[in-house]
Amino acid sequence: MVACPLALLPEYSGTVAADRALLEQIRKSSVLIVGRMSARERYKGHDQLLESWPRVLRVVPGAQLVVAGKGDDLERLRAKAGALGIGGDVLFPGFVSEETLAALRERVSVFAMPSSGEGFGLVYLDAMRAALPCIGGSRDAGAEVIVDGETGICVDPSDTEALSSAVSLLLTTPELREAYGAAGRRRFDAVFTFERYCERLLPILRNAFT
């Protein structure tokens, strides 16, 4: 069996302006998660991030969690943030355009998706291309994309204490964020560009049909 990791197409330069009003709400210490919020697929780590946030705030007062995306579980998650007493520190912008997502990645400090069932996780590649340090789950394909201790941190998604520690560490250690982000960008360029994908795939196809 030969593994051929997925890749990203070259960056899209759209004509739609980024949402400046949203970007102005992003705080200095902020963490982004992007993904569909589905009541039938609660594996991406939204709940775990919310549950970890009170601990994060004790270490990093004012730290902000930005939950981008839509889905039928959004209102439940918004209510949960309120019940946890962190509603003022969690931003739910709903659907955001690709242009705004790109600008968000430039504004936030960390990308986190502590998933327990992700098949691959292209969102990690988006973050790595933007030189963002990543936090992912240790049980799924995220651990194949993120190099733990080099481009980010992989945690047991069920361990909210470990998750809050990982978030707090990155938010309070700018030199570590910068090192992980730079290493992530290098890994993206070396492994996950569309050109690298074609270089891996074409020999596989040739062997399969000869």
Image (spheres, rainbow, N blue to C red):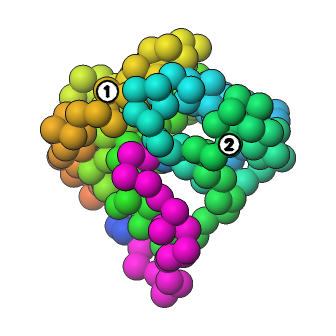
Quadrant of the image containing the C terminus: top left
At x 53% / y 43%, what residue is drawn? 65
Q: Nearer the viewer, residue 6 or 176?
A: 176
Say above or below: 149 vs 32.
above
**Main secondary-structure element of the magenta-colored stretch:** loop
Could you tell me if the residues under marks 2 and 1 are in contact, i.e. CB atoms within 8 Å?
Answer: no
Report whether residue 131 is seen: yes
Q: Which residues are magenta?
A: 12-31
Tell whether 108 sits left or right of 65: left
Give coordinates of residue 26: x percent, y percent: 47, 58
Question: Disc 2 or 1, which lies upstream in sequence?
Answer: 2
Say above or below: 138 vs 196.
above
Give coordinates of residue 87: x percent, y percent: 68, 42
Quadrant of the image containing the N terminus: top left
At x 44% / y 54%, what residue is drawn? 27
Tell me the kind of residue under disc 2.
Gly
- Most extreme residue toward the bottom is 15
The CA distance from mark 2 to mark 1 is: 22 Å
Tag 2 residue: 87
Say above or below: 134 vs 13.
above
Tag 1 residue: 169
Give coordinates of residue 195: x percent, y percent: 27, 58
Give coordinates of residue 52: x percent, y percent: 56, 24
Report whether residue 205 is seen: no
Residue 24 lies in the magenta stretch: yes
Q: Nearer the viewer, residue 98 or 62?
A: 62
At x 39% / y 46%, what residue is drawn? 29
Q: Residues within 10 Å of mark 2 (few under 14, many from 20)?
A: some
**What secondary structure is marked by label 2?**
helix
**What secondary structure is marked by label 1?**
helix
Say above or below: 19 vs 180.
below
